[in-house]
Amino acid sequence: MEMTGEQLIRAAQAEVWRGLNDPEVLKACISGCESIERLSDTEYTVVTTAAIGPVNARFRGKLLLADLAPPNSYSLFFDGQGGAAGFGKGSAKVSLATEGAGTRLSYAVNAQVGGKLAQIGSRLIDGVAKKLADDFFTAFNQKIAGPAAAAAERPAEATPGAAPLWWVVAILAAMFLLATYT
């Protein structure tokens, strides 16, 4: 499954970069996130709960950041398990660019799921993933730029037929950005 999107964050690029790399900020912005633990400068473990249709599960995953080019871009690799619910793995590329007084965040996610999650159907998964992405960006905008900026921005649209998977597995979101779930 693939997903691309972008979001205008009403904050300076350096501030957006800091937020995307701060486990406490991400945990506060990711619905259902129980913990994000930094193992090294580029590796994290994530625990989150999610309900995707009839499947409710607790997901544990690992995130690895690579190709870091602060404060412009990085790649994210994820691998997560949700017990009987299934698994998810994939990658995401995230880039930031100054746009006016804000920052344009662009992302491309490629993910695979298996187990019960793969049996649910892409339409249901897409809807849940879009809601998780919308919720993340609203919370992230509010946390980074303040309530007025978050209210002024509409969440980014995903490519039709795409499912943001890394969001739920690893961070549901650690970026959201991507989005992935296992």
Image (spheres, rainbow, N blue to C red):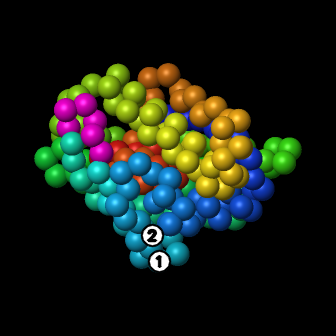
Say above or below: 13 vs 37: above
Residue 37, given in percent of the width and then of the height, sits at: 40, 71
Residue 44, given in percent of the width and then of the height, sits at: 42, 68
Residue at 44% in and 23% down: 161
The residue that disc 2 covers is 43
Q: Secondary structure at mark 2?
A: strand
> Going by the picture, which residue comes out furthest to the front?
147
Say above or below: 105 vs 81: above
Residue at 39% in and 42% down: 165
Identify the amino acid type marked 2.
Answer: Glu
Residue at 64% in and 32% down: 154
Q: Which residues are magenta?
A: 50-55
Residue 131 falls left or right of residue 153: left
The residue that disc 1 covers is 40
Residue 20, given in percent of the width and then of the height, sits at: 59, 59
Density class for disc 1 (Cα within 10 Å; few <14, some 14-19, many ≥20) is few
Callout 1 touching callout 2 (CB < 8 Å): yes
Identify the amino acid type marked 1.
Answer: Ser
**Quick check: is 117 in the magenta stretch?**
no
Residue at 41% in and 48% down: 31
Q: Please say whether residue 137 is visible from this viewpoint.
A: yes
